[in-house]
């Protein structure tokens, strides 16, 4: 599934956090590609990525205008089924947040939410999701153990597996490796490259090397605006905007 | 010069702190020693017989009444308090006027002396609802009395659960009910338990509110409508009558033991709670 954004503004109370994203020709996030959001902290990357699964609904006084279309439907319409939306659009957070229950129950959490109760079916989903997240071999003998006993990198892959178990089409990742060591980061980057064959991935990253390593397209954010959005190679080798150039060459931010 | 002055004030403050801490400790030790010395000699097996007579002022009926009182009060107040807190923390928008009202009401209720609860309970449950002096009237009164304690500790426990669980749950498409009951509440259980134990302590130690509502009949209550005297009330009654001061002290020893056990349990649970942390 692709995402298209038209003229999106977002306010936290009086604070104008996103300013007219996709205001002229609109912004497209392509299917089965990795799209990276980069920019200095506080520029609205997390805010924007949370627009796509309506996580901002949880924040009081948060107002959004504009048109966000996923699979041909404006997700901010009243008729939107939020459960269905979040089933289609999964999310992985900055800090790994495995639930305080067994590895198995973590993965089975989403399918159970959607009413799947049959043991055999759940077993199958759990194994498939863990394999997809490249975690099966490490945990297959301790599925009943608490997920909190895993290492940080394993916990993050567990969170990815937990998201995959919902069978999403789009996966949002908000700085998924910023709390991890370089080796775990490498594992997750490999995983992302593998996952993009099947899923549309949007990733926020504070690490520009990471954006060049894994993403096809990159959007550069500054103070709530998308300054430049293009092929990743283009953004890093031949940016059109002076501010983008300054940022990617490390002159500020 | 300033340095010397500071050293002197530091020294004085240090000495004063120790002095007052020592006094506090001494007073406490004195009270405990006083109770133990006066009470232990009277701790005879016959004080644990199942019937109370004027010759043998057994505390067993009071122990059993205390257990009933604690159990029944918790059964009413704990679910009520937990659901109220869930509503306050998870469901209502911040800054809601109604919630601020509930919260300040709870704060105020927590500060009211227990005699006032006793008086209220007697008028409300004893007279208006015709329950008289009974286990039921006592239970209902104490339920109201400990509700603020349960609400406040549960609120704290719910708030201390990391938002990571909530976000993770919602991001998977779960509804509020599932997030609250499957993710937030289980993580808050140790904190809630600590609050429940605190409430137990309040019930066990209560006398004024119960004298007015549950009465002072020293036998095992056969029905909810029967009067029942708890250990604290028993102690108050014995020492008031003046004939059984030794037995009153013996009751105090048992009461002290019970409170000790309850407080230790609370401390242990609080420790588990902080060691485990809660939520991402
Ligand atoms: N819940 C919120 N309420 C008010 N302001 C917020 C909230 N969340 C984020 N902001 C503000 O919005 C801006 C963008 O934040 P964020 O999207 O988290 O930035 P980034 O992820 O790029 O670091 C920041 O100035 C931040 O302070
Ligand atoms: Mg962020």
Image (cartoon, helix red, strand yellow):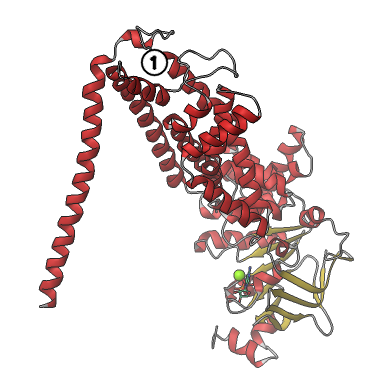
Asked whether residue A159 is in view, the answer is: no
Q: Which residue is at a point 63% across and 90% down the rendered structure image?
A: A243
Q: Residues within 10 Å of mark 1 (few under 14, many from 20)?
A: many
Q: Mark 1 near ligand 1 (CB under 8 Å)? A: no
Please state if A171 lies on the left or on the right of B206 as rendered: right
**Is residue B164 positioned above or below B255 on the image?**
below
Of helix, strand and loop, which one carries label 1? loop
Q: Judge left or right: residue A62 versus residue B272.
A: right
Q: Residue at x 75, y 71 (%)?
A: A63
Query: What residue sits right under mark 1 in the picture?
Result: B59
The image quadrant in which ligand 1 is located: bottom right
- Please give left or right for residue A82 compared with residue A39 in the image: right
Looking at the picture, how far across and down is residue B156, in whole percent? Answer: 52, 50
User: Which percent across, then down, holds residue B160?
Assistant: 53, 52
Q: Which residue is at the front of the view, B78 or A158?
A: B78
Q: Is residue B151 visible?
A: yes
Can you say which quadrant of the picture contains the N terminus of chain A? Answer: bottom right
* Chain letter for the residue marked with disc 1 in the picture: B
Q: Residue at x 29, y 15 (%)?
A: B43
> Residue farthest to the bottom?
A242
Along the viewing direction, whichever of B183 and A98 lies nearer the viewer: B183
Quarter of the image for residue A113 reads top right
């Amino acid at each position: 599934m692709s995402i298209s954004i038209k003229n999106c503004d977002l306010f936290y109370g009086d604070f104008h956090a996103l300013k007219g994203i996709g205001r002229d020709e609109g912004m497209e996030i392509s299917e089965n590609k990795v799209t990276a959001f980069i920019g200095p902290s506080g520029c609205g990357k997390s805010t924007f990525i949370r627009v796509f699964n309506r996580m901002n609904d949880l924040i009081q006084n948060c107002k959004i205008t504009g048109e966000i279309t996923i699979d041909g439907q404006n997700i901010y319409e009243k008729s939107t089924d939020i459960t269905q939306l979040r089933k289609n659009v999964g999310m992985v957070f900055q800090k790994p947040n495995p639930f305080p229950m067994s590895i198995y129950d973590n993965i089975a959490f989403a399918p159970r939410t959607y009413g799947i109760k049959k043991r055999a079916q759940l077993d199958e989903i759990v194994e498939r999701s863990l394999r997809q997240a490249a975690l099966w071999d490490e945990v297959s003998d301790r599925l009943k153990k608490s997920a909190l006993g895993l290492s940080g990198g394993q916990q993050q892959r567990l969170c990815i597996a937990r998201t995959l178990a919902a069978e999403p089409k789009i996966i949002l990742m908000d700085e998924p490796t910023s709390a991890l060591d370089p080796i775990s980061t490498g594992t997750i980057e490999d995983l992302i490259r593998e996952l993009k064959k099947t899923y549309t991935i949007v990733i926020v990253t504070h690490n520009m090397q990471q954006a060049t390593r894994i993403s096809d397209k990159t959007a550069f954010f500054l103070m709530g605006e998308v300054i430049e959005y293009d092929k990743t190679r283009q953004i890093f080798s031949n940016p059109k905007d002076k501010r983008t150039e300054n940022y990617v060459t490390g002159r500020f931010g | 010069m300033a340095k010397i002055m500071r050293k002197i004030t530091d020294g004085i403050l240090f000495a004063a702190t120790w002095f007052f801490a020592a006094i506090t400790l001494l007073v406490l030790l004195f009270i405990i020693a006083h109770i133990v010395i006066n009470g232990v000699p009277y701790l005879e097996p016959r004080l644990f017989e199942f019937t109370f007579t004027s010759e043998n002022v057994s505390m067993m009926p009071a122990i059993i009444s205390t257990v009933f009182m604690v159990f029944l009060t918790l059964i009413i107040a704990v679910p009520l308090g937990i659901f109220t807190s869930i509503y306050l923390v998870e469901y209502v928008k911040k800054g809601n006027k109604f919630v601020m009202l509930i919260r300040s009401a709870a704060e105020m209720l927590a500060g009211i002396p227990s005699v006032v609860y006793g008086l209220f309970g007697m008028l409300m449950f004893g007279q208006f609802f015709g329950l008289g002096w009974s286990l039921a009237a006592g239970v209902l009164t104490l339920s109201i009395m400990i509700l603020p304690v349960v609400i406040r500790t549960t609120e704290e426990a719910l708030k201390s659960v990391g938002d990571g669980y909530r976000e993770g749950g919602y991001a998977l498409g779960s509804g509020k009910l599932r997030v609250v009951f499957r993710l937030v509440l289980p993580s808050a259980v140790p904190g809630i338990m600590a609050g429940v134990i605190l409430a137990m302590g309040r019930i066990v130690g209560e006398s004024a509110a119960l004298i007015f509502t549950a009465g002072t009949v020293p036998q095992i209550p056969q029905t909810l409508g029967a009067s029942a005297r708890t250990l604290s009330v028993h102690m108050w009654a014995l020492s008031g009558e003046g004939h059984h001061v030794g037995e009153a002290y013996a009751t105090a020893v048992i009461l002290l033991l019970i409170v000790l056990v309850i407080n230790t349990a609370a401390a242990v649970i609080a420790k588990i709670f902080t060691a485990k942390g809660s939520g991402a």
